[in-house]
Structure formats: C-alpha cells, structure tokens
C-alpha cells in the first residue's frame, strides 16, 4: 500500500505526523483517518446510486468499529447502520443516529435487546430464529406497533475466507437454510404474525472476501429463493446482502481502489437485474452492509517498541506496549499485518522480526516475520489496517486498559475514544461484605 511519508521520514496519517501523534496521545493508540472513512462511504453510496438508481441503502456494519463519532460520520454521509447488540444500538441512539435507519442482527438477541430495540423504534429487526419471531410479535403487539422484519437466510454459498468468518455455508449457526425448506417455513411463520411486517431477506456470506462472483452467486441464489417464496404467496421487497468485501492487510492481499469496490457493487447489481428479469421479479430494495472495507484501511495502531529479544538462529522478538488485548486477530485468526517504524518509514528493511505484545501468553503476537529496519527500544511502530475488528474486539485481558482512539482530519487529531484509566478497570468490581 502506498504510505504517506513526510520530509523527516515519518509516517503521515490524515495529514498528521504519526510520531507526533504518539508523543501527544501516548501509545498504544488507534488512529483513524476520517477522509478515508468518508471516502469509502461515498464510494459505496454513489456506486449504489449509479448502478441501482438509488433503490437501496448502504448500512455501515458498526461491529467493525462502533463509537459515537462513527455513527455521526455514517449519518452525515447518508448511510444507515447495522447493529448486532443492544450496546451497539445504544451507542447509535446516543449519537443521535436515526433509529429508523438501523437494522438489528443477531442469532440470539436477548429479550432485553429486543425490548430496547422496539422501545427506541428501530427500523428493522433481522430474524434468525422462530422463537425470536414469536417473542418479537408479542412485544410489538404490546407496544401497538407493526415491526418491519427481514429473515436471515442461508443460501449455502461458501466464500474463500477464514473458517471463523465464513457464515453462509450450510453448517452455520446463522440463518434459515434454503435447501432444506427451513427458509420458506419461517417465511410462512412470520407472514402469519399480526405485529410483524415481512419485508424480505438478509444473507451474509462471510468477511474479507475478494471474489466478486461470490456475492453475485449469493444474490442469484437468494433471488431464486425469492421467486419460490413469491410463488408461495410471500413477496419480498427488500434484499439485504450483508457485507464482506475484503481489504489489504499485507503483501498477500490485492490492493483495491475505489474502482474495485465500485466493481463489486456493479457485479452484484448487474446480477440482480439480470436474475430479476429472468425470474419475473421486481427489483428488490437493495441493502449492503460493509464494515471492514469502510474502516479497515483507515485505521493504524501506534506502539512504542520496548524489550527486544534475539534467540540466535531462531527469531528476534520485538515487543510493543500493546498486544492481544487491543488486537486479538493474530491470536484468533493468524491474521497478517504490515508493520513499519513510524519514525523511519523511508528506511530499508534489513531483518524479519516477530512483533510480540505484552500479555502473559506466548500466543500474544501481532505479526510474525515482519520485515523491518533494525528496531530500537523507543521507536514508534505502526501497524497498518487496524481500523476494523481491533478496537471492537479489544478486551481488558491482563487488566490492560483498552487504548484510546483519535480521529485525524487535515492534520488535526481529536479523541473519539478517551483513554481507559486504572480506575475504570475496577469501576464495576465489587467486594462482598464477607471479604471485607
Ligand atoms: N453484516 C453482517 C450480518 C455481518 O455478520 C458482518 C460481519 C457484516 C455485515 C460486515 O462484514 P464486513 O464488511 O466487515 O466484512 N471479527 C472478524 C470479522 C467478523 C465479521 C462478522 N460479520 C475479523 O476480525 O476478521
């Protein structure tokens, strides 16, 4: 990926010097480039408008990175949002995001989450089980409303991605399978509910996918099913194809530009138009839920290099002040990242090192065999493409505080997530009387 380096050889992010950001805000630090986030939102929105006559909506998949400022940005760019928990919905609502533009997912939403969603007038609930339909119908009736719902279906498309982020293969906890008739039975079940309005179908085939044809194949299979459902008397108006477009993390990945993401949209919308013509269906309202491709490459994590340990003939460990508590993706998926020294970004790489975190666990690794110039204690290290599923999957493992996040725009940086303190860490702890 083309990186921006200033005259001092420092990495630049959104017009700000990364080393200066590290000095000012401390490390570890998540840095987000606002222009890149907005640009990706615009790419999707304008492609959908152009290729599909605006008959649809882009919903930011906020699980990738959820905080008040992100919902503000999504709202100002005219996007909706998808949420997967009461906590994400609460964050959206607290940011003043219009609840009617929010869609809630989850294979096992709790009663509290469903009540909270209805009480705050959520736009759409995506149903993922029959019991959920039954409960939601009662809750909606109690509130004298008719709730718009989609049904999550599983078209059985296998996309090439990590097993844990693949979701629409037949053996999945998500969705009603099309092949065994479960999807149609659920449609009939929902259509029989007085307080639910059946709007259509949702499917999500997985994440970090580069093959455009996988999305077209999913669209095609869902449309085949929509024709069957229509024949059975259930006409779907909405087709939500989820998210999943891939991003660049390291030299194994393709580098995609705006035109490639536009091509994703065009491939999908062309297939929908072709298929609807063939099947005699009217064009559904199309929803897409990109998350990673909106925030992934816009994010960088900054660290300070600490201990360095060389095991002759085996490997060199360069430890940083972060780790799996703020980026668990290597531990979970063996994800590969691109690493550089933010203050020496123009220097040639002379060695391959393993970047380790500070947690008490051998698997606490950020990157294996990362090419770098010889790192020194005190260097600021930058790990690229950490905008998606890093902060959102962070924890307080080992009671490390979750790092703060800053948003950079035209060289100006502001907190969008403030630093956690040690006091925050014990805020919810309690000591039973007998231990006092
Ligand atoms: N819609 C639904 C229903 C989803 O389940 C997901 C992601 C998305 C949209 C957004 O997909 P994206 O455009 O971000 O690929 N923690 C994993 C990723 C899990 C993704 C789960 N669902 C990771 O770190 O790679």
Image: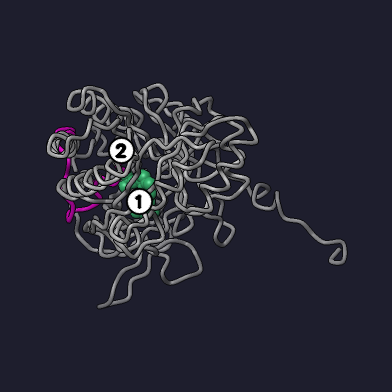
Q: Quadrant of the N terminus?
A: top left
Q: Is residue 242 magenta?
A: yes
Query: In the shown orientation, is residue 66 left or right of residue 399?
Result: left
Q: Residues within 10 Å of mark 1 (few under 14, many from 20)?
A: many
Q: Which mark is residue 239?
A: 2
Task: Count the labels in the image.
Answer: 2
Examine the image and state in which quarter residue 333 appears.
Answer: bottom left
Q: Nearer the viewer, residue 367 or 112?
A: 112
**Secondary structure type for disc 1:** helix
Q: Nearer the viewer, residue 353 or 228?
A: 228
Whether residue 421 appears in this view of the structure is yes
- Relative height, residue 306 to residue 19 (above, below): below
Image coordinates of residue 267 in percent, x first then y, are 14, 39
Q: Which mark is residue 184?
A: 1
Residue for point 46% across, 55% down? 321
Mark whose residue sits in front, 2 or 1? 1
State the CA–CA distance, disc 2 to disc 1: 15 Å
Image coordinates of residue 166 in percent, x first then y, are 31, 58
Q: Earlier in the sequence, mark 2 or mark 1?
A: 1
Residue for point 43% across, 29% down? 413
Outermost residue to the bottom: 313
Residue for point 49% across, 26% down? 97
Residue extent of the magenta highlight = 239-263
Q: Is residue 166 magenta?
A: no
Q: Quadrant of the C terminus?
A: bottom right
- Relative height, residue 71 to residue 108 (above, below): above
Image coordinates of residue 426 in percent, x first then y, are 69, 53
Whether residue 379 appears in this view of the structure is no
Image coordinates of residue 327 in percent, x first then y, are 42, 54
């Amino acid at each position: 990926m083309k990186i921006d380096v200033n005259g001092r050889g420092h990495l630049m992010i959104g017009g700000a010097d990364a080393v200066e950001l590290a000095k000012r805000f401390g490390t570890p630090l998540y840095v987000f480039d606002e222009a890149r986030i907005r640009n990706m939102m615009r790419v999707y929105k304008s492609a959908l408008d152009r290729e599909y006559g605006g008959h649809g909506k882009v919903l930011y998949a906020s699980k990738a990175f959820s905080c008040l400022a992100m919902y503000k940005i999504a709202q100002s760019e005219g996007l909706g949002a998808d949420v997967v928990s009461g906590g994400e919905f609460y964050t959206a609502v607290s940011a003043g995001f219009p609840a009617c533009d929010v869609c809630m997912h989850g294979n096992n939403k709790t009663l509290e989450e469903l009540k909270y969603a209805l009480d705050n007038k959520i736009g759409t609930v995506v149903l993922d089980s029959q019991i959920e339909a039954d409960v939601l119908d009662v809750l909606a009736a109690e509130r004298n409303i008719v709730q718009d719902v989609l049904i999550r279906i599983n078209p059985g498309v296998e996309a090439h991605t990590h097993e844990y982020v693949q979701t629409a293969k037949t053996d999945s906890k998500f969705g009603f399978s099309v092949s065994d008739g479960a999807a149609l039975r659920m449609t009939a079940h929902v259509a029989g509910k007085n307080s639910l309005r059946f709007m259509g179908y949702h499917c999500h085939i997985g994440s970090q996918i580069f093959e455009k044809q996988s999305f077209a194949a999913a669209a095609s299979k869902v449309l085949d099913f929509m024709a069957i459902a229509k024949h059975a008397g259930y006409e779907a108006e909405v087709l939500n194809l989820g998210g999943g477009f891939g991003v660049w993390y390291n030299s194994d990945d393709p580098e995609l530009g705006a035109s490639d993401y536009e091509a994703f949209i065009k491939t999908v919308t062309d297939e929908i138009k072709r298929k609807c013509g063939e099947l005699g269906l009217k064009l559904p309202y199309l929803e897409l839920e990109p998350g990673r491709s909106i925030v992934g490459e816009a994010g960088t994590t900054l660290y300070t290099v600490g201990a360095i340990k060389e095991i002759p003939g085996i490997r060199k460990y360069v430890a940083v002040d972060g780790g799996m508590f703020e980026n668990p993706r290597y531990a979970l998926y063996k994800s590969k990242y691109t690493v550089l020294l933010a203050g020496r970004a123009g220097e040639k790489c002379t060695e391959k090192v393993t970047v380790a975190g500070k947690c008490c666990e051998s698997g606490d690794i950020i990157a294996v065999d990362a090419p770098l110039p010889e790192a020194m204690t005190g260097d600021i290290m930058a790990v690229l493409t950490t905008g998606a599923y890093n902060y959102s999957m962070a924890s307080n493992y080992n009671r490390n505080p979750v790092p703060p996040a800053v948003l950079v725009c035209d060289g100006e940086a502001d907190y969008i997530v403030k630093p956690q303190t040690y006091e925050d860490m014990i805020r919810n702890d309690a000591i039973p009387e007998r231990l006092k």
